[in-house]
Image (spheres, coloured by chain):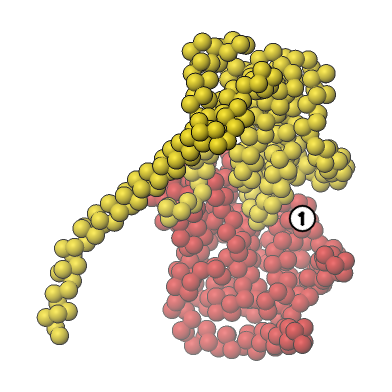
Amino acid sequence: MSPDTLSTPVVETAKAPDRAQTRAQAARRRKAIVFAVRVLLLVAFLGLWELLSRAKAIDPFNFSMPSKIWDQIWTWGTHGTALGSLGEQIWYTLYEALLGWVIGVITGVVFGIALGRISFLADVLGPFIKVLNSIPRIVLAPIFLIWFGLGPSSKVASAVVLVFFPVFFNAFQGAREVDRNLVANARILGASDRRVTLQVVIPSATSWIFTSLHVSFGFALIGAIVGEYIGATKGIGLLVSQSQNTFNPAGVYAAMVILAVVALAAEGLLTFAERRIFRWKPTGSDS
Amino acid sequence: MSADTSPAIELRGASKIFKTPSGGLHTAVRDLDLTVGRGEFVAVVGPTGCGKSTTLTLVSGLEEPSEGEVLVAGEPVAGVGDKVGFVFQQDATFPWRTVLSNVMAGPRFRGVPKAEARDKARTWLAKVGLAAFEDRYPHQLSGGQRKRVALAATFVNDPEILLMDEPFSALDVQTRALMSDELLELWEGTGASVVFVTHDLEESIALADKVVVMTAGPATVKQVFEIDLPRPRKVESVRLEPRFIEIYREIWESLGEEVRITRERGAAHVA
């Protein structure tokens, strides 16, 4: 019995680094497999689409096919679109969406925190905000077109109204849900009301606000695109509407692909910023 | 000036009545008279939920009394003053600030220049033994370490009055004894007056000069006991002394009755 119990730990220590290594290897392998299956799925989807379309099992005009869409993007990229270079269209849409997003986020956060902190304001303005929120705001886009014309400002405006509400409601909720202990502690330590707002309420509302930022950038893009679709001189939304009017479904799909890439890149940037700002938060791997 | 001779804290016939969410009235504290002398360590014990914490919020200025008077250094309390420090039962460190920045918060809120605040904060972090942890965030610390941060953040403001609301109740027994000793050491250098709320009678006798027993809610003072144990004390050893046990038995006779009343009410509530 005793020789057995003595020998086991020796074997264990010899094996320990080995086990860590195999575990790391397994983790790496799993990652590779997940990635490979993803690629496979994408290839299968695109291949099937191409195949069915070429075999005319689905209507090649309505559904187009990946190769045509890629040709369309390529042509736009190398020869430019009917409206000018592709880069210019992307930049135009991005500019409108970003500007609308920034304005919407700032006003949303300021109003949300202010109403969350000052209950008099919240009581007075509450019903108005509910009414405004219940309007399907996308129908405001034509009105903005009338007010602000074909230029970027009408698109910025529709992006702002789409972004404002989700950000506002989250900031408001965040300001309301601040830990009462933290506020009491800050007051005891000597913080004025202004300091409490700036150094306790806003930091603890940031996680609420950031949740809404992810959703709202998508909304800003929608606002800009819909605005362009209704009437514009430049932009990806206009590309969509022109492709539609010239019976070019490949153009519509191509514009969609470009938009998806733009949205993904923006999302990546936002996640990066979030990681930097929330270093103080416990994460799954840490602690 | 009269402020020099007046006691640190005085409550005269103070009552606090809250509105409950259902629209009723709840009396947390009723007709409370309590005097805390300068540099005195007073422990307040009472059954759970009797309104001990409310007494502290009245003294701190976070809440106003519905009736009666609350005086700090002879002056009526109006809002949160700069003489008071408060250690809360729950964690009240700012999670987005590092340890150092948490301890700096008080002086910075009070307009102390950054460099000076940092020096003061480092001094107090060293006193609570967390000098090596100044760059950590609260979530990276243990519960006891976070409490130390809270103590340092409170003491760095040099409070004349220190209010503590069951500060160690969330800690395990060993850590609690350690923290009690540390608190006594920190306090002995400052000359601050302390009101320490707890439901742990042992803790209160080991720490305090005076133990105040509260009645079952609504809370009012039932009896006050002077604790004549010599200082400096060590929490772990002082509670083995015969005199300690004598005092314990004496106070428990008074406190036990109130605990029974509270328990019976709870049982009636459930039934």
Is A117 displayed left or right of B177 in the figure?
right
Measured as percent of width and height from the top left, residue A179 is found at: 65, 54
- Residue appearing at x 48%, y 81% in the figure: B239
Identity of the residue drawn at 70% across and 74% down: B49
Q: Which chain is yellow?
A: A
Q: Nearer the viewer, residue A222 or B206?
A: A222
| Camera-nearest residue between A15 and A281 | A15
Q: Closer to the camera, A253 or A182?
A: A253
Q: Position of residue B18 (x, y in %)?
A: 82, 65
Looking at the image, can residue A5 be seen?
yes
Residue B114 seen in the current view: no
Q: Decide: is B166 above or below A247.
A: below
Count the numbered circles shown: 1
- The answer to which image quadrant residue B32 occupies is bottom right
| Snapshot quadrant of residue A253 | top right
Q: Is residue A254 positioned above or below B250 on the image?
A: above
Instruction: Say which residue label 1 marks.
Output: B77
Residue B108: image location, x then y, percent: 58, 41
In the displayed image of the protein, which residue is found farthest to the left? A3
Which image quarter: residue A237?
top right
- Residue A15, x across and y down, in percent: 19, 63
Chain label for disc 1: B
Is the N terminus of chain A in the top left, top right, bottom left or bottom right quadrant?
A: bottom left
Residue toward you, B250 or A34? A34
Q: Secondary structure at mark 1?
A: loop
Q: Is residue B112 above or below residue A180?
A: above
Q: Which chain is red?
A: B
Q: Amino acid at mark 1?
A: Val
Q: Dividing the image into 4 quarters, which one contains the C terminus of chain A?
A: bottom left
Residue in the image at 57% along x and 29% along y: A60
Question: Residue at left 69%, top 39%?
Answer: A167
The crowd level at tag 1 (other Cα within 10 Å; few <14, some 14-19, many 20+) is many
